[in-house]
Structure formats: structure tokens, C-alpha cells
Amino acid sequence: MPLDAICLQAVVEELRPQLLNLRIDKVQQPARDQVILLLRGNKRLLLNAGANAPRIQLTETARDNPAEPPMFCMLLRKHLVGARVADITQPTLERLVRLELDITDDFGQPGKRTLVLEAMGRRSNLILLDGEGRIIDCMRRVDADMSAQRQVLPGLYYEPPASVGRLPVTEETEEGFWEKLAAANPERQLDAFLLDSYFGISPLMARELAFRTAGATDVRLFELTETAKDTFWLEISEFANAIRENHFTPIMLTKDGKPEEFACLPILQYGGIVETERFDSFSALMDSFYEQRERQERVRQRGADLIRTATTARDRLRRKLALQEKDYAETQDRDKLRVCGDLITSNLYRMERGSSKLTCENFYEEDCPSVTIQLDPLLTPQQNAAKYYKRYMKAKTAEKYLREQMEIARRDMEYLESVLEEISHAETEQDFIDIRNELKDAGFLRKQGKKEIKHAAKPRAFRTTSGFRVLVGRNNRQNDQLTMKEADHRDLWFHTQKIHGSHVILRTEGREVDNDTIVEAAKLAAYYSQARESGNVPVDYTRVKNVKKPTGARPGMVIYTTCRTVNVTPEEALVKQLQEK
């Protein structure tokens, strides 16, 4: 979720004692929407005006800077390097922060600058003001064509965003609450009533207050008893007091290890569906939350690029193969060309130069039917015969060449299908780096720029109910490494039958393997394959010693003999249960 006004207040209260009187040593702009102020004491203040993650925080996350700083960064350096933080403020429950700075101008005179962060979703902005409140410049300029109500342009006096007209929840009185409740539509849900009536409450906190009042988030006003209405006001007043007194706790909600939301107060509405993780500071909380979110976004973008690359290459091969199959079909009629050459040669005595066709008996067929052969009138009869023989030999040679090329195209198409399957199961950025390097080595991506030096990811590791270790390859190169080099010849190898998927190795260590363990390993093979969403999937398994790699085969491509087959249905719950922690 974006940073709401209450969390922003908690962040500002946390930052104020840490920032006051510190001087700005450097200004960086690592991304289009991000500015980092490097402060004395090795503190890094991040101001993010991005639509999806507007915020202010101290950060420990290192970010790469562009070779050439943007113009806005150069402007901030000119005005802010050497400035001292005089104050950091937030208007009551507004998603807006003012960083007040004391500067010394080029003439040695003291002055003022203000850096304003408007953390308002897609309208977020970072604005630099002079000592009189005029806009020096901003990250996003807003002219009259973009907004008739409020322009944000250099030279204009800064005007804060217009108020929404609702009462801040911290200013509500008991009398005012009962008046609003009596005038509200009884069909409204409690959270909707709060969002309609008060300023500064986020949808998450509105649902939380509803849950704490009635034990559910979808309760309507008419369902409240008089006692429940008293509880409703009590929860609102306690919530407002916590905001006024700055009683905040940095909390992140995670699901299956992935960040879902964060808050400044305990969240009870999700029960056991999510896990709650507490942090020492809001800056540490946001570093963790957004770093994981940004990494997931980078992974998603990388995956989209790789899918596009592999899909384009596969589709190109399909078109190429279709043309090759058409040409190959034409070579199958080449004997007709040889027969034409023979018939021309046998009838040279009947032909005259300049003829455009020859009609004669075809003695290669029963009853010697009459046949007409097209001739080139510019060539002699002997040259026409030679032309047909040459076309025959060319078709004969082309048949062998096309057969080889079609086999290569089919092999590469199968390989690219397996790569697309790998991408669909990739979980980390390193997985995508490994797949990208694999595509480069296979010739489907150009090798350019600096080589990525990160170590390859380890195979996925699982432990069966009976204690056997199972390893699952993440990509084709890892499949080869796992099966052909790391596995013992006594280990069992699993793979979906005639379906693209990962190589799965069951480490036997020379022990006998029970049937339940084989079924569990087969379910892992089915889950990490194209048949993940299917049922009754056939999975072949055999000893590793029976698996061979053909000479010149693409990564991950193997052949095997003397296998057995088990039919299983993939189970995501089982996969999570068996995964090594």
C-alpha cells in the first residue's frame, strides 16, 4: 500500500530528532523519481516521489547512480549542498512533508530553502522553494493544460494541495461523532462511513476499526447495537489519541514470506492469514518492504523481457520450419525432373531449336501415355535436358540439407519451449540472470556489456516425508549439471513424460526407496513442469545411469531407457511442506 498520512506522521516524528542540524554533503538522483540526500554522520535520506511508492525515510539500501546526473539533481546540488536541516514538518494528517533548510548563498548571506515532498500517489511531486515560498523547480511540472485548479511551475508561489473538506479524525468530538452517525445512511459499511466522514484514515485502518468494533470488516451501520456503537466511538477515540500522542509501532504484514502491507499500529483483521513482523524503526521497515517489492518488480520486468525474447525466437523458427517443410515436400517430386531429362535426351532427333514444348511417349509408365514437357525456347534441346538434370540434382541435395535443417529447427523449438517453462517457474532475480546467460550461450541473445558475475543459484531442495533429499533444477544448464555431473549413478531421475519440465534427482545414498517417496518426488517433477495445473500427470523415473546426453544436444536435452511411469497430480501444499527451510 502507499504510505498513508498516519504512517507518514510516524516517520516524520522518527526522523526529526535524527536530522535536525545535520548538513547536506551530497545530492544524488539514482532514479527518475528518487532523490537521496547524504547527510553528515553517514545518513542517507531518501525522498521518493514515485506514483507507487512515495515516501521519505533513512535508507541503508545502496542504489546505483547514473553516469550523468539529471538536471533536477544538478539544481538541487547547487542550492542544497552545505545546507543545514532546520526542521521537518507535516501539516496535520496531510501526505505532505516540508524539509526546512538553512543555506548560505553565493555572497555569503544566510538564506532559506524548503524541499516539499507531496506523497500523493500518481500526483506525487518533489518541489524546491526559495526563502519567499516561490517554486525554484520541481520533479514534475504541472501546467494549466494538466490541471486548471493548481499549477506547479518555476516562478509561481507554492500553493499546497486543496483540502478535501473532511474533518481530521484527531479533531473529532464525541458529540460530533454521534451527529455524523445519526445522519449516515444505515446501509453504509463501517469502513465506508469512516472514509466518508474523516480525513487522514486509510482504507486499511478504516477496516481495522470496523473489525475491532464488530469482529468483521463488512458490517453495516444498521447492524450495530447500542453497545456496539459505544465500542465504535471508543475505538475511534483511542485511535485518535494514539495519533495525537505518537504511539506508533512499525509493523509489516507478510504472506508466504512476501510483504503485503505495513502499518503504524497492530493489525488484527487478517487473523492467521498473514504473519506480523515488527521493526525497530519505520525506515528499516520501509527499506525491507520496498526493497522486496522493487526486487519483485525488477524480476517481473526481467521475466517479461526474457519471455518476449524466447517467444520471438520460437515464432521465427516456426515460420522458418513451415517454409522448409514446403521446400522439402517439393523435393519429393524430383524424379519427375529426371524423367523429363531422360525423355528429352531420347527424343533429340525429333526436336528443333526454339521449341517451347515437347510432346512424346513416357516409356517409364505402362502403356506409354503421352506427356508434354515444357522447354526453354532460348536453349538447345541438349541444354534443356541438362537443365532438368541439374534441377534434379539440386533437389536431391536440398532434400538432405533440408532434413538436417528441419531437425535443428525442431530441436531449437523444443529447447525454447523448455526455456519458457523455466521462466514461468523462476522465483528470484538470480534465476533470470542464469536463464539470460543460458540464452546468450545458446546464441538467442547477443553477448554485450559487462558479464554478470553473480554466482548461479542452487537447485531447489526438498526433503521427503521419509527423509530422502530431492533436488530440482531451476534451468536447463542446471538440469545438465544436476543430472550429468552431480547425481550419483544410483540416484533416481524423474521427468514428466513428453512434457517440458525440470530434472528431478532423488538422492538414494544406496538405500531402498519406498513407493510413497517415489510418488512425492514424482509430484515435485509434475509441479515444476508444464503440467502444473493438470491432473493424473505421467512421470517417468529411472536410475541416473540410464540417462544419456546426445552429442551436440541443447542444454537440458537427454535420452533415457528402461524407465517406469507413475501418474500423479501436482499439489502446491505438498511442495511447500517438503521444501527445505
Image (spheres, rainbow, N blue to C red):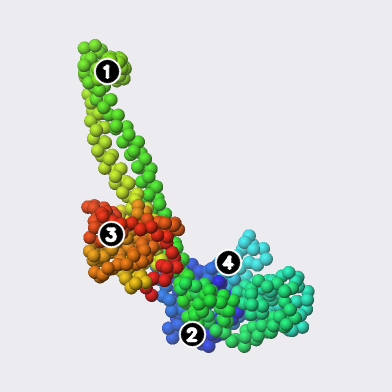
What's the residue at 47%, 72% (across, down)? 256
Badge 3 amino acid:
Thr
Q: Give the labeled residue for mark 4.
A: 122
Q: Nearer the viewer's eye, disc 4 or disc 1? A: 1
Distance, label 3 to label 4, CA atoms, is 56 Å
Q: Quadrant of the N terminus?
A: bottom right
Tag 2, which secondary structure? loop
Amino acid under disc 2:
Asp
Image-quadrant location for residue 140: bottom right
Label 4 or label 1, whichever comes before in sequence order: 4
Q: Which mark is residue 280?
A: 2
- Is there any visible trace of residue 409 in the rendered image? yes
Q: CA distance from mark 1 to mark 2?
A: 97 Å
Amino acid under disc 1: Glu
Cα separation between marks 4 and 1: 83 Å
**Horizontal side, residue 313 vs residue 401: left or right:** right
Tell me where residue 462 appears, x and y as whole percent: 35, 70
Which tag, 4 or 2, sits closer to the chain's start? 4
